Image (spheres, grey):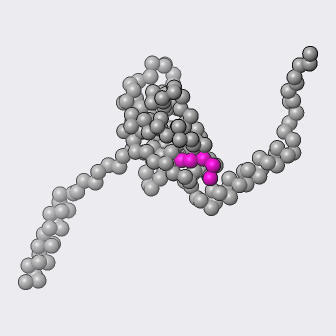
Amino acid sequence: MSTPTTSTAPPTTDHREAARQQRRQIQAARELLKPSEVRLHHVPRWLARRIKAALGKSSRRYYSAFDEVQRAAAATAANGSAYWLDHFGSTTLHGRPAFVAEPYLSPSMIPDAIRFAELLGLTFDILPNSWWFPGRTTRLVFQEPPEPQQADPGQDAGQDAREQAETTSDT
């Protein structure tokens, strides 16, 4: 009976050329579609704070912000895993910080990602334009809700006075 052998030989030229070709395709797609660049594996502080607020402090003595993200993703996963949490990191969208994951998306991943957003009180969006592999991966965007714009009472009073002055000068 023969034992199967595994090759430890370096990749062949064909594999290297295929990898180079794929990198060129990704770069060309990025230049065409211009997705915002992702700081891979970065977890924003605001997200870690929200996870701690929702789930409490981790019982582990040493843990990273990514451990916190995995803990929240596991807490919201229907089957105990978070396949949607692939090629994650942070970026800026529309002038606001965002946490993103860019998986090779399947419909079964979406409910878990929605539960993650709901648990943490985040807005959630799905965008076709991703940084990881444009055209192949899909961007899942998690952001803190925008703060409601509060009117400055002094500014409104000044505006009202100007409008009233214009009205009386017209008569």
| Residue 171: image location, x then y, percent | 7, 83
Using residue 53 as the reference point, say whether residue 34 is left or right of it.
right
The magenta span reads 135-139
Q: Nearer the viewer, residue 166 or 82?
A: 82
Q: Residue at x 11, y 83 (%)?
A: 170
User: What secondary structure is the stretch in magenta mostly built from?
Assistant: loop
Using residue 8 as the reference point, say whether residue 37 is left or right of it.
left
| Residue 102: image location, x then y, percent | 57, 44
Examine the rendered structure and indicate whether residue 107 appears above or below residue 62: below
Q: Nearer the viewer, residue 49 or 104?
A: 104
- Kindly give the residue lying farthest to the right in the view shown: 1
Q: Quadrant of residue 55?
A: top left
Residue 118 seen in the figure: yes
Q: Is residue 57 magenta?
A: no
How many dots with numbers? 0
Residue 67 seen in the figure: no
Q: Nearer the viewer, residue 29 or 42?
A: 29
Q: Residue at x 39, y 41 (%)?
A: 122
Q: Is residue 137 magenta?
A: yes
Examine the rendered structure and indicate whether residue 81 appears above or below residue 94: above
- Kindly give the residue lying farthest to the bottom in the view shown: 171
Q: Tell me the quarter of the image containing the N terminus.
A: top right
| Residue 88: image location, x then y, percent | 56, 40
Q: Residue at x 45, y 43 (%)?
A: 142
Q: Residue at x 77, y 52 (%)?
A: 21
Using residue 134 as the reference point, say whether residue 117 is left or right of it.
left
| Residue 141: image location, x then y, percent | 48, 46
Q: Quadrant of residue 32?
A: bottom right
Using residue 92 as the reference point, say whether residue 122 is left or right of it.
left
